[in-house]
Image (spheres, rainbow, N blue to C red):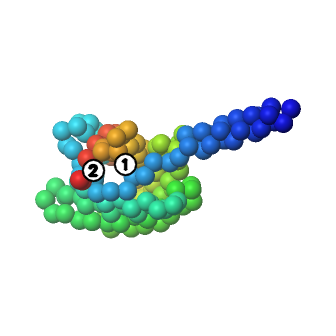
């Protein structure tokens, strides 16, 4: 009877550990460069996408420094700090205030960042919303960021592939 009890307890512990290991979240930390050849951009892709990102992930926080090349060739950078628990975070991205929430997918493998920027241009209020879904490759060497944006200019979608610096 004692042996059966121990076996049941051991099995329950093993199942708990396996469930915990399966739910482990990925780590997006690193320096990432966009691979234009692998990315799916097209005519209707979002503009002003980071050419390079440096990501620092600690516990339940994420810091993203984005280097963006403007049409003029000029590079600008911005840093966004997020908590990955669904709480709203406010940052300045591309010289505009941006409110974002970041949450994990159920399996802990994808990070979903939902953002909104509201600003004024030429006396008009403009709102841009976006959803980014971050996915790390099995080998951890590439990061896919699926982006969907909505603005007064319409909806845009793209899949941007980033290679991790060695």
Q: Which residue: 13% across, 59% down?
A: 73
Return the mark for residue 112: none
Residue 63, percent across and down?
Answer: 41, 63
Q: Earlier in the sequence, mark 2 or mark 1?
A: 1
Question: Which residue is more in the foreground, 114 or 152?
Answer: 114
The residue sitting at the left extreme is 73
The alpha-carbon separation of the residues under discs 2 and 1 comes to 34 Å
Left or right, residue 29 beside residue 86: left
In the displayed structure, 45 sits above or below 118; it is above
Q: Which residue: 20% across, 58% down?
A: 69
Residue at mark 1: 152
The residue sitting at the right extreme is 1
Label 2 packing within 10 angstroms: few (<14), some (14-19), many (20+): many
Residue 91, percent across and down?
Answer: 43, 66
Q: Is residue 146 visible?
A: no
Q: The N terminus lies in which quarter of the figure?
A: top right
Q: Is residue 107 visible?
A: yes
Residue at mark 2: 164
In the displayed structure, 136 sits above or below 79; it is above
For the residue labelled by badge 2, is the local secondary structure a helix, a strand or a loop?
Answer: strand
């Amino acid at each position: 009877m004692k042996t059966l009890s121990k076996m049941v307890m051991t099995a329950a512990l093993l199942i708990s550990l396996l469930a915990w290991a399966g739910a482990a979240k990925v780590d997006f930390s690193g320096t990432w460069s966009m691979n234009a050849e692998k990315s799916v951009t097209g005519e209707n892709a979002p503009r002003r996408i980071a050419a390079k990102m440096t990501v620092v992930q600690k516990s339940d926080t994420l810091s993203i420094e984005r280097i963006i090349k403007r049409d003029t060739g000029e590079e600008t950078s911005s840093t966004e700090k997020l908590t990955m628990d669904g709480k709203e975070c406010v940052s300045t991205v591309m010289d505009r205030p941006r409110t974002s929430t970041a949450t994990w997918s159920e399996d802990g493998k994808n990070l979903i960042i939902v953002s909104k920027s509201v600003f004024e241009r030429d006396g008009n209020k403009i709102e841009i919303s976006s959803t980014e879904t971050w996915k790390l490759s099995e080998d951890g060497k590439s990061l896919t960021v699926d982006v969907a944006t909505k603005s007064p200019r319409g909806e845009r979608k793209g899949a941007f592939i980033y290679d991790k610096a060695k």
